[in-house]
Image: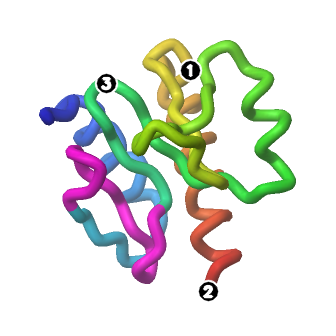
Amino acid sequence: MAFNPQLAIRIRTQLDLFPEAIIEKRMFGGVSFLYKGKMTVGIVKEDLAVRIVSDKMEVELAKASVRPMDFTKRRIQEFVYVSANGFKTESQLLYYIELGLEHAKSKL
């Protein structure tokens, strides 16, 4: 399963804004970006996969471009997919990266 390489470049550029070490890892048939071993965001085909703290899930899932992650045909807790319409701009992409970083830091 391929992933969108242009989106990977955009994510890498945004992650340069953060001084923390980020590791890339192949996951879910795409690529994911981990902070201290915890997934923040990833790319699955054309979608952005984001880990979100549970108390923000309801707000995010109410957005048209966000849906529950169901990689294994069942809903995965604290994971969402965001379609391309949800991260057209760099500020929108940064928003989801920050949500992913918030989740990773909450699990340390």
Is the N terminus in the top left, top right, bottom left or bottom right quadrant?
top left
Mark 2 Cα-neighbour bin, 10 Å: few <14, some 14–19, many ≥20: few
Compare marks 3 and 1 and give the one earlier in the sequence.
3
Depth order, front residue of 75/7 = 75
Image mark for residue 36: none
Q: Which residue is mark 2?
A: 108
Compare marks 3 and 2 and give the one earlier in the sequence.
3
Callout 1, which amino acid? Answer: Gly
Q: Is residue 49 magenta?
A: no
Q: Which residue is mark 1?
A: 86
Q: Position of residue 41 (x, y in %)?
A: 45, 51
Is the C terminus in the top left, top right, bottom left or bottom right quadrant?
bottom right
Are the residues flagged by discs 2 and 1 in contact, CB closer than 8 Å? no
Callout 3, which amino acid? Answer: Glu
Q: Position of residue 8 (x, y in %)?
A: 25, 41
Give the residue at the far bottom of this rendering.
108
Mark 3 vs mark 2, CA separation in Å: 29 Å
Residue in the image at 83% along x and 37% along y: 58
Q: Is residue 36 magenta?
A: yes
Q: Is residue 43 left or right of residue 39?
A: left
* SS label for mark 1: helix
Image mark for residue 46: 3
Span highlighted in magenta in the image: 26-39
